[in-house]
């Protein structure tokens, strides 16, 4: 599958507005060219640079592809959405956005704590994917307009989980994605020392 012809692929989700290639962030073409052949072949799924907010869309009919839609052609958005997909179980992957309700920016302290709790593992995997791609990574609390909170405990939780994946192993799909990205972007397999420094 060519990364720049997603909008014309048979089986592509008809509800997705694909961002024109000219607006993709540098490296996204290589990212999609690396991952989408594997995703389509093994999982009937592909990463799609959308024009709006990120969303996961399961196939509407048998011949469609599931779509992991990431925001505005941004490389790190693709990694973040892929990380969520790597963790979603088979039943979750049959549901739009895996059946989760997203509480938007503007969360109070208790809503933010709940948001951060479910973001630890995805962001830990995103860190691995970023290292495999030769990219920088920062944790995201995604609550600019909400109640100010101390995000250091969240950053520490992401760091601990990322390091735990060194000893316990990544989930299977995350492991395969990291492997493919390391090969594509000529990066070493992440080691424990990659996760020593606390993220900002």
Image (cartoon, rainbow, N blue to C red):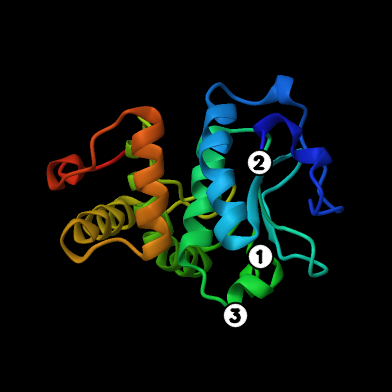
The image's mark for residue 1 is none
Where does the image place residue 144, in percent across and percent down from the top left?
A: 55, 44
**Dividing the picture into quarters, in which one does residue 4 lie?**
top right
**Residue 71: mark in rendering:** 2
Q: Nearer the viewer, residue 21 or 121?
A: 21
Residue 91, disc: 3
> From this viewpoint, is residue 171 visible?
yes
Looking at the image, which residue is at 53% across and 29% down?
30
Q: Residue at x 74, y 39 (%)?
A: 6
Classify mark 2: helix, strand or loop.
strand
Select label 3 or label 2 by which is in front: 3
User: Does residue 169 appear to the left or right of 15 in the view shown?
Assistant: left
Of the pair 125 and 152, the residue shown nearer to us: 125
Kind of element beneath mark 3: loop
Whether residues under marks 1 and 2 lie with C-beta atoms below 8 angstroms apart, the answer is: no
Q: Position of residue 44 (x, y in %)?
A: 65, 60
Q: Which mark is residue 97?
A: 1
Residue 59, x across and y down, in percent: 75, 65
Q: How would you rate the neighbour count of disc 3 (Cα within 10 Å): few for under 14, some for 14-19, many for 20 or more?
A: few
């Amino acid at each position: 599958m060519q990364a720049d012809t997603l909008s014309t692929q048979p089986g592509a989700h008809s509800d997705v507005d694909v961002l024109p290639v000219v607006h993709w962030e540098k490296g996204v073409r290589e990212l999609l060219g690396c991952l989408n052949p594997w995703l389509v072949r093994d999982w009937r799924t592909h990463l799609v640079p959308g024009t709006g907010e990120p969303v996961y869309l399961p196939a509407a009919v048998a011949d469609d592809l599931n779509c992991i839609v990431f925001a505005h052609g941004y490389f790190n958005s693709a990694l973040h959405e892929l990380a969520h997909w790597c963790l979603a179980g088979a039943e979750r992957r049959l549901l739009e956005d895996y059946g989760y309700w997203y509480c938007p920016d503007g969360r109070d302290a208790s809503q933010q704590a709940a948001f951060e709790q479910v973001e630890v593992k995805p962001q830990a995997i995103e860190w691995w994917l970023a290292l495999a791609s030769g990219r920088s990574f920062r944790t995201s609390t995604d609550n600019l307009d909400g109640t100010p909170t101390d995000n250091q405990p969240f950053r520490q939780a992401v760091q601990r989980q990322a390091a735990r994946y060194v000893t316990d192993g990544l989930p299977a799909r995350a492991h395969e994605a990291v492997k493919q990205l390391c090969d594509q972007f000529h990066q070493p397999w992440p080691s424990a020392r990659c996760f020593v420094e606390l993220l900002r």
